[in-house]
Amino acid sequence: MTALLLADADLRFGIVYGLQRRDPAIDFLPAQGIIPDSMEDPDVLALAAGLGRVLVSHDRKTMPGHFYRFLEKGDSPGLILVPQVLAIGSAIEELHVVWACGEAEEFRNRVIYLPL
């Protein structure tokens, strides 16, 4: 089964849009309407877990620590971290490779740092 994705509020929308255009089979929810801008990282991780979706974020500074603390209490579908400086086209390609080559279970409780 392929992974379902959820964009964090900080993720550039062009990445979500571009990845969906690149491969319409990808189920990638944008943050808009799902994650309020003021939602704290632990709550975002809980929301993603509740939805059964791998969270995709630019937050390489604080999100990993929150993620590992979250795992102390339960499981997570996973976290993919995309550097803010990575060009949108490169981010789309990297995410596509990770999504296409992995099954949902392979993301569980893992942090994946892009680029690979």
Image (cartoon, helix red, strand yellow):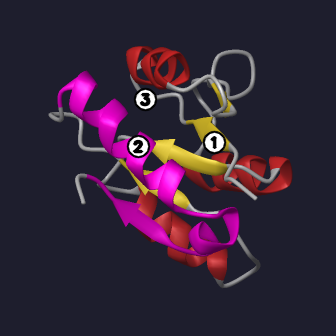
* Labelled pair 3, 2 in contact (Cβ < 8 Å): no
Residue 25 coordinates in the image, percent (x, y): 67, 31
Residue 53 coordinates in the image, percent (x, y): 71, 49
Q: Nearer the viewer, residue 100 or 34?
A: 100
Residue visible at 24% across and 60% down? Answer: 116
* Labelled pair 3, 1 in contact (Cβ < 8 Å): no
Residue 95: numbered disc: 2
Q: Amino acid at mark 1?
A: Leu
> Residue beneath label 3, please?
11
Task: Give left or right: position of 63 versus 85.
Answer: right
Which segment is the magenta one?
A: 87-114
Res. 71 image quadrant = bottom right
Q: Secondary structure at mark 2?
A: helix
Q: CA distance from mark 3 to mark 2?
A: 13 Å
Q: CA distance from mark 2 to mark 1?
A: 10 Å
Q: Amino acid at mark 3?
A: Leu
